[in-house]
Image (tube, helix red, strand yellow):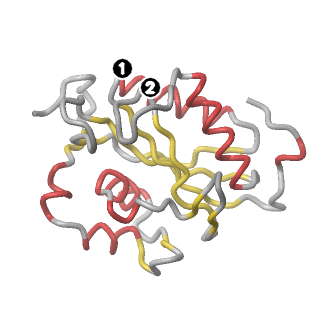
Amino acid sequence: MPLGYPAITETKPVIAYIGLGANLGDPTGQLRRALALIAALDEVEVVQVSTFYWNPPLGPKGQPWYVNAVAQVRTRLAAEELLRGLQRIEAALGRVRGERWGPRVIDLDLLLYDGEVSRTPELVLPHPEMHRRAFVLAPLAEIAPDAWHPVLNKSAAQLLAELAAADREALKPMLLEESERCPV
């Protein structure tokens, strides 16, 4: 998914973290397809990916559980360009924006971008809800425990430890042999 030369704004690569989630269709497959498409973006290298986690849904009742993960990427794209690439991937995978916290075939969130703090109509960095979400912090702390929240001045591991035990314990790491079998 080439973005073209003007999208490249960083002279050297920076590290960013992307949250992935899905609870419709084939959530595990959707996350894998999204990761492949992220890796195919020009000027984006997927460095590492967390374990996939089962997570009970937020929002409307009666939804299937989510599968969530976090990917660390190295990129020379500006944060806004990376976000636009993620939104194109969501659209390509069938995401239709609807009900807030409703079920979705794929959700890609730019969580952290090189310590940048930003608030525009298109992008808020760091992600404004990440410090409240075990399904973000557990996979982030797994791959980058020292990833720094530049507003709260705490690491991913510290933020995770501050969450209620019940929130942390609700997550179920997906075993390698699991596909779509939810643990509850």
Are the residues tagged 1 and 2 within 8 Å (C-beta)? yes
Give me the residue at 40% from left, 35% from top: 99
User: Helix, strand, or loop for circle 1?
Assistant: loop
| Count of numbered marks | 2
Q: Is residue 13 left or right of residue 171?
A: right
Q: Which labelled disc corresponds to residue 87? A: none
Q: Residue at x 27, y 23 (%)?
A: 179
Residues at marks 1 and 2, CA–CA distance in whole angstroms: 6 Å
Rendered location of residue 110, percent (x, y): 55, 51
Q: Residue at x 19, y 57 (%)?
A: 167
Q: Position of residue 146 (x, y in %)?
A: 44, 71
User: What kind of element bears circle 2?
Assistant: helix
Quarter of the picture containing the C terminus is top left
Could you classify mark 1 by the number of other residues whose Cα lies within 10 Å: few (under 14), some (14-19), or many (20 or more)? some
Q: Which mark is residue 26?
A: 1
Q: Is residue 21 above or below residue 167?
A: above
Residue neighbourhood size for the residue with mark 2, other residues' Cα within 10 Å, grouped as few (<14), some (14–19), many (≥20): many
Give the answer, above or below, for where 56 lies relative to 124: above
Q: Does residue 35 appear to the left or right of 86 in the view shown?
A: left
Question: In this image, 52 relative to 11: left or right?
Answer: left
Q: Amino acid at mark 1?
A: Asp
The image quarter in which residue 57 lies: top left
| Rendered position, 61 above or below 14 | above
- Which residue type carries mark 2? Gln
Q: Nearer the viewer, residue 26 or 51?
A: 26
Q: Quadrant of the N terminus?
A: top right
How far across and down, in percent of the image, does residue 45 sit?
65, 44
User: Which image quadrant for residue 158?
Assistant: bottom left
Judging by the rendered image, the residue that carries numbered circle 2 is 30
Give the residue displayed 46% in from the left and 29% down from the top. Answer: 32
Residue farthest along the left direction in this orientation? 184
